[in-house]
């Protein structure tokens, strides 16, 4: 008898919280898809493992907490919170800034025969990039300057298109 989908989700998120990728991978069906909205689709195990190894290396103190879980049939929704300080290795070619990142998100999992076959994850990646210093703070002088440059480029492109 296969475990309930909520049990599988619970084991998976507990393993991620421990940074135990072997235990987390055991929750997946081979070839499963982890769709991280800000990142794209990752195949399990290869691309998925590479992403999480890189995340944990960049944020060595990464913490993960499940806030709520809702389960219906083969689908499970997990509301989570993650936090860590960007003090480790570069992440997506970005060098560690020492900034602390906090995020909340929702994951929708589909579990078949006791294994995750698909996970769709959603969070505000722009807020995370602001926290680590990649994007300027909201309503800051730097953000206003960036928006002004973007708007100037848009006007110049429109002008060029009409000539």
Image (tube, rainbow, N blue to C red):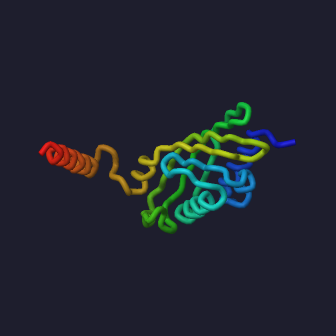
Point 21% across, 49% down: residue: 153
Name the quarter where the C terminus is drawn.
top left
Name the quarter where the N terminus is drawn.
top right
Residue that protrudes farthest toward the bottom in the picture = 89
Point 54% across, 48% down: residue: 36
Query: Is 98 located above or below residue 121 in the figure?
Result: below
Frontmost residue, 89 versus 137: 89
List x then y, in percent, for residue 50. 59, 63
Residue that protrudes farthest toward the left in the picture = 163
List x then y, in percent, for residue 77. 64, 37
Query: Is 60 located above or below residue 145 in the figure?
Result: below
List x then y, in percent, for residue 123. 51, 44
Frontmost residue, 2 versus 126: 2
Residue that protrudes farthest toward the front in the picture = 163
Number of marks in picture: 0
Point 44% across, 65% down: residue: 93
Left/right of residue 123 with respect to residue 49 in the rendered view: left
Residue that protrudes farthest toward the top in the picture = 72
| Res 80 → quadrant | top right
Point 42% across, 47% down: residue: 126
List x then y, in percent, for residue 76. 68, 37
Frontmost residue, 81 versus 3: 3
């Amino acid at each position: 008898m296969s475990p309930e989908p909520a049990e599988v989700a619970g084991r998976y998120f507990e393993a991620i919280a421990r940074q135990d990728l072997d235990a987390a991978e055991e929750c997946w069906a081979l070839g499963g898809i982890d769709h991280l909205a800000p990142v794209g689709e990752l195949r399990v195990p290869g691309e998925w493992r590479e992403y999480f190894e890189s995340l944990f290396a960049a944020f060595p103190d990464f913490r993960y907490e499940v806030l709520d879980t809702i389960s219906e049939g083969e689908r499970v929704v997990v509301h989570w919170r993650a936090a860590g300080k960007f003090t480790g290795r570069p992440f997506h070619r970005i060098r560690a800034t020492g900034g602390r990142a906090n995020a909340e998100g929702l994951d929708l999992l589909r579990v078949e025969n006791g294994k995750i076959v698909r996970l769709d994850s959603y969070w505000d990646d722009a807020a995370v990039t602001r926290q680590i210093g990649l994007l300027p703070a909201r309503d800051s002088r730097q953000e206003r300057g960036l928006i002004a440059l973007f708007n100037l480029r848009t006007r110049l492109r429109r002008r060029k298109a009409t000539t």
